[in-house]
Image (spheres, rainbow, N blue to C red):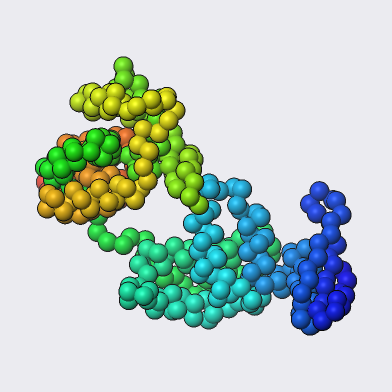
């Protein structure tokens, strides 16, 4: 490296060897003082040698290089936004190996006390997401760059996993809502797929005619839709378990065939519901207002499907296969909806005691 004066400012030329063993050169101009130029020079040396005397901001660049290509585009976009807006502004100039649990606690308190222009605080679920992300960065430093410990472990967590109790519609409520959607075929058939198949909204919006086998009465779920940076993005579904084939009730098979006949010049691999998630949310608002049914989240329609199947007597394992969950998740998350077996258990234990 070398530091040069250019008129009233300073320039640094940085030469390094990349991961292929090739010699590279970069430079940075415009430093107001020699000290600033030398500080930037030292930071590049720390990064090149993976020295955790580097700043948090510099380590984030290394973390990005390590992780970005390993994650789905929409997953990384969420992480990047949190890092850029919630973490780097606070920790960016601090040295990675000097960040303490006390500083993490101070940041947590700032996040928990934050209010937007309307006076709303961050939700408990979002606070937990923020905490998970900063902890993930430090875990990465511990696992791969020899940081001695993760200060987030001493600081403890914030927020909680679930925002509120699970909401869902009864079948009667859904049918009332669905009737209000009939003036817009795309909306009606979209909500029919959501309610009677229990698919996620991203899975719905990625559906194409090729995903349906009308002879077998099935729909294959193999992708999900997101809108990122004003672009439509189709990726693999949320988890490996999410790849599944769902058998539809016959009335829904007939309805989707009718819907496809309404679409003009749709190709086998064109999206059948070429709208965004915000469109579905607006339609949910409209239907709830017109019918008087409670306004639930789009994702709560999935809960409604699961609760319907539980009420019909299906097992957690069978339901999990249909909705792309692990059976333990169904058992845990919907335990309060399954018929209680406590009385039957107690009676059998009483008989066992008498033998």
- Residue, x 23% and y 38% (percent of image)? 184
Decide if residue 99 is on the left or right side of residue 232: right
When asked about the image quadrant of residue 206, the answer is top left
- Most foreground residue, 283 or 147: 283
- Most foreground residue, 351 or 59: 59
* Rendering coords of residue 305 (x, y %): 24, 41
Decide if residue 62 is on the left or right side of residue 109: right
Seen in the picture, residue 235 relative to 4 is either above or below; the reply is above
- Residue, x 27% and y 51% (percent of image)? 282
* Rendering coords of residue 219 (x, y %): 35, 28
Decide if residue 312 is on the left or right side of residue 114: left
When asked about the image quadrant of residue 115, the answer is bottom left
Seen in the picture, residue 249 relative to 179 is either above or below; the reply is above
- Residue, x 63% and y 59% (percent of image)? 63
Decide if residue 73 is on the left or right side of residue 185: right
* Rendering coords of residue 151 (x, y %): 56, 73
Q: The N terminus is located in which quarter?
A: bottom right
When asked about the image quadrant of residue 204, the answer is top left
- Most foreground residue, 287 or 309: 287
């Amino acid at each position: 490296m070398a530091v040069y004066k250019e008129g009233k400012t300073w320039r640094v030329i940085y030469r390094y060897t990349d991961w292929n063993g090739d010699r590279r050169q970069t430079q940075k101009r415009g430093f107001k003082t020699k000290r600033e130029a030398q500080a930037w020079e030292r930071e590049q040396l720390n990064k090149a040698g993976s020295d955790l005397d580097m700043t948090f901001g510099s380590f984030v660049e290394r973390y990005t290089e390590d992780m970005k290509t390993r994650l789905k585009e929409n997953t990384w976009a969420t992480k990047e936004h949190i890092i850029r807006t919630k973490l780097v502004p606070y920790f960016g100039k601090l040295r990675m190996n000097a960040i303490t649990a006390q500083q993490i606690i101070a940041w947590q308190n700032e996040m928990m006390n934050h209010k937007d222009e309307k006076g709303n605080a961050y939700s408990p679920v979002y606070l937990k997401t923020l905490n998970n992300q900063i902890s993930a960065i430090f875990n990465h430093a511990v696992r791969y760059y020899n940081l001695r410990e993760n200060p987030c472990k001493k600081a403890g967590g914030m927020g909680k996993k679930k925002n509120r109790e699970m909401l869902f519609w009864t079948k009667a409520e859904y049918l009332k809502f669905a009737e209000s959607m009939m003036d817009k075929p795309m909306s009606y058939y979209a909500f029919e797929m959501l309610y009677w198949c229990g698919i996620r909204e991203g899975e719905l919006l990625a559906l194409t005619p090729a995903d349906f086998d009308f002879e077998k009465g099935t729909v294959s779920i193999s992708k999900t839709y997101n809108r990122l940076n004003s672009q439509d993005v189709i990726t693999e579904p949320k988890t490996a378990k999410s790849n599944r084939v769902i058998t539809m009730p016959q009335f829904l098979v007939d309805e989707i065939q009718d819907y496809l006949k309404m679409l003009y010049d749709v190709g086998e691999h064109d999206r059948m519901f070429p709208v965004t998630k915000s469109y579905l949310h607006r339609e949910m608002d409209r239907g709830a207002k017109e019918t008087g049914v409670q306004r639930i989240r789009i994702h709560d329609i999935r809960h409604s499907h699961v609760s319907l199947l539980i009420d019909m007597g299906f097992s957690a394992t069978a339901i999990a296969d249909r909705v792309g969950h692990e059976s333990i998740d169904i058992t845990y998350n919907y335990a309060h909806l399954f018929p209680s077996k406590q009385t039957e258990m107690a009676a059998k234990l009483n008989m066992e005691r008498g033998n």
